[in-house]
Image: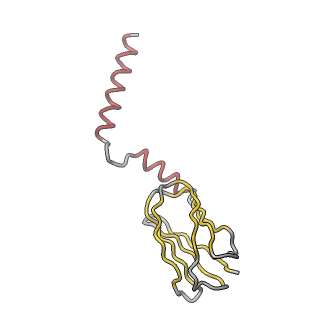
Amino acid sequence: MKRFIAIWIAALCTFAAAAQTNAGKTTLQDKMVSASLMANADISINPNPVVSTSFSLVMQNLEKGKYQVFLYDTSGRKYLLKTLEFEGGSAIQPIILPKEATVGVYILQVVSKAVRFSRKLTIQ
């Protein structure tokens, strides 16, 4: 029993020292969780085709950070630039279309330091 308590106390002290050492730093475990999130990362547009003045950007398994949302027509003209502060994980972000975006096919891009997604968006 004494040996078990000694091992337990040593493990607890090691854990406390590691926690102090890693305070404010990204740990290997954080990187593993981050890599796991990014492996399943995705975005989708709901509804698509868009039949009103807005749609939902469905963000799944993304890291915390800044994301820029761009909307281009097929000739490359930019209609939208929006910056999102994302808390990470999954969420639904409403996007209001600019008045200039008329019926047609567009490319929606979501970009961060780590990822870039492109999706076709149709406005009816």
Instruction: Indicate the quadrant where residue 107 lies.
Output: bottom right
| Image coords of residue 86 (percent x, y) | 48, 60
Looking at the rendered image, the quarter that the N terminus falls into is top left
Front residue of 78/61: it is 78
Looking at the rendered image, the quarter that the C terminus falls into is bottom right
User: Which color mode does the image show?
Assistant: secondary structure
Above/below status of 39 relative to 46: above
Most extreme residue toward the top is 1
Q: How many marks?
A: 0
Left or right side of 20 for 45:
right
Image point (47%, 55%), residue name: 87
Most extreme residue toward the bottom is 75
| Image coords of residue 100 (percent x, y) | 57, 86
| Image coords of residue 27 (percent x, y) | 38, 46
Front residue of 111/123: it is 123
Image point (33%, 48%), residue name: 25
Above/below status of 81 relative to 57: below
Image point (61%, 73%), residue name: 119
| Image coords of residue 17 (percent x, y) | 29, 33
Instruction: Indicate the quadrant where residue 97 lies.
Output: bottom right
Left or right side of 4 for 97:
right
Left or right side of 116 for 43:
right
Front residue of 120/93: it is 93
